[in-house]
Amino acid sequence: MTAVLEAHGFGKRYRRRTWALRGVDLTVPEGTITALVGPNGSGKSTLIRAWIGFERPTEGRLVTGGVDPRKDRGAAVGLVGYVPQSPSLYGGLSVAEHLRLAATLRDGFDVSLAAHYIDRLSIPLTALASELSGGEQAQVGLALALGTRARILLLDEPLASLDPLARREFLHVLVEAVRSEGHTALLSSHVITDIEQACDRLIVLGKGHTLLDLSISEALAHHRVIEGPIATPIPPDRLVGSFPSAAGEGLTLVRVPVAHDVSTEGPADGRPATLEEVVIGHMAAGRVRRTPAAVEAAA
Amino acid sequence: MILTATRLTYRINRFEIRAVLLAAALSVAVSALVVSWINSSGYVACINVYDTPSLKCLELMDIGRWATRIASLSLNLVPVFPFLAGLLLGTPVIARELDRGTARLAWSLGPSRMRWFVQRTSPMLVVAVVASFAIGFVAEWLVALFTPDVDLANSFAAFHQRGVLIATGAFLVTSVAVGLGAIVGRTIPTLLLALVLGGAGMLAIGEVDHKLLAAEAVPLSDSGGGNDLQLDSRFQLPDGRLVTWEELMVIDPHAMESEFGIQYPWVALGIPGTRYREVETREALIEVAFGLAFLGLGAFVVGRRRPG
């Protein structure tokens, strides 16, 4: 499958001291909806902004739809529809005026398509942006991105400020648009349930680099969770990380071979991991040292 | 497309545009009323009359004084207008968009930031120049009314207070605010910085221009009246040389000791009124050139910076 977003040894350092990301190697295949997950400060926004040319890599190289955004930012922007965490609409303009504004800025912007999505989300075209809720503003941001008819969509935590219903509507429109148009979307989010519903691929960032890069089904098939203390030693290469459950019970995420035989598994093999546990386990691994002693202590 | 972009820029910055246009319209309307009344009432014949006023002039004097005060106030505010209009129109164009994050939306939608820059700045520059040109034109009208004997095309009367220099001054300040806004990216700091740098810039241009003019100064004849731009003065020695006071004290230390004061003739140096249009055009071009430099700086920064 062709990769439309690529990072090769990508690193970004701010103020000559702090590395937001370093040594990131990943690819986003064409036609997928990929979730980009990681704790606050893990560099998700930096990576997304770099793919659209808003950040310049300190080291390494990025590719956006075959274009290096550092060398040709205009071409990269032309291939991308971008939805930032805060849509930052023009407060004094109506929704319809935002669509016309987009048409003046981008040749080929499809005003009627964007208006169609706005209409589906029941947002009045005549409403001023300042009168819209945060959720509605995010949805207008999505409609603007879809109106570009760009084949790559970069969505930087657009769900953060949305209520559950608005999140559901947002994702529904996104998934439908991506599937019908054959787009590729990269969605950064903290909300794992939404990712599970909408995405088919998962990238976990932590400690400034890639912790996991798999399809959702692979991520679920390749991980298991052991509840409570670990009875038998686990090989270091299988141990991912330990973290507490919502009830405070110690959980340990372990990797399993691809061909895991469920019929022969014993209690030491644990139970199937949920996507949330996969994500949290890898995020925990990115935060603490992965020594058996630390794992035992956490468990 | 251009019309739509212009209309949207107007909608985005409607408060600032309306404020500037309203102030300009008000100034033009009041000045037109004053000029119209002075002409229609016959008070024009009473201006600059130092003999015993006629009975009609005495009758019109009360209203005439008010009309004159309003006209003077309007003329005194003219040099301030391009400064305020430039700050008000230039600051929000880039700085506020970076401040509020709308630049990020626009830059993610449009592959060409230059198109966005031109779409945003052009209407604001046009408003600044047109409004200031109207103010400068009306100011010229008022000056002509109160100095009917002066040919304003050949006179430095009310220099910097009338004509095209008001418009080019507004262009310069607007461009400075646009350029600084692109660098600073915050509205209030840009406003303050543009206030300081715009003022300093105009003073600097005035100073440079003064030096250029001083280098070209010639002895002024008495017949120039109030039309010439006097820049300096010298004492004329019997051999025709022109010297400063300090030079004179070295040449003739006893020059002050005469009971009739200094006996050397005093000569005014400056630019004859006949060169007014030439000097005005040169200064206008300098302001436009500096303005374009700041716009270029703004465009360069917009093309390279992060959207905030």
Image (cartoon, rainbow, N blue to C red):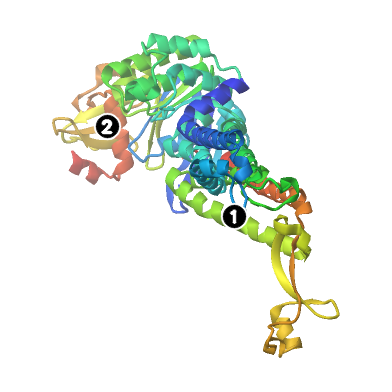
The reply to whether residue A195 is visible in this rendering is: no
Question: Type of residue at label 1?
Answer: Gly
Give the percent coordinates (x, y) of residue B126: 61, 34
Give the percent coordinates (x, y) of residue A145: 48, 21
Mark 1 and mark 2 in contact? Answer it, CB < 8 Å. Answer: no
Which mark, by number, is residue B201?
Answer: 1
Q: Secondary structure at mark 2?
A: strand
Residue at x 48%, y 44% (from the top left corner): B62
Work out whether residue A270 or residue A23 is closer to the camera in this orientation and state it: A23
Give the percent coordinates (x, y) of residue A190: 32, 29
Which mark, by number, is residue A253?
Answer: 2
Binning the other alpha carbons within 10 Å of mark 1 as few (below 14), some (14 to 19) or many (20 upward) gives: some
Give the percent coordinates (x, y) of residue B147: 66, 48
State whether residue A115 is above or below residue B276: above
State whether residue A213 is above or below residue A172: below
State whether residue B168 is above or below residue A108: below
Q: Is residue A98 left or right of residue B140?
A: left
State whether residue A14 is above or below residue A97: below
Question: Type of residue at label 2?
Answer: Leu
The reply to whether residue B34 is visible in this rendering is: yes
Residue B174 falls in which quadrant of the image? Answer: top right
Work out whether residue B65 or residue A220 is closer to the camera in this orientation and state it: B65
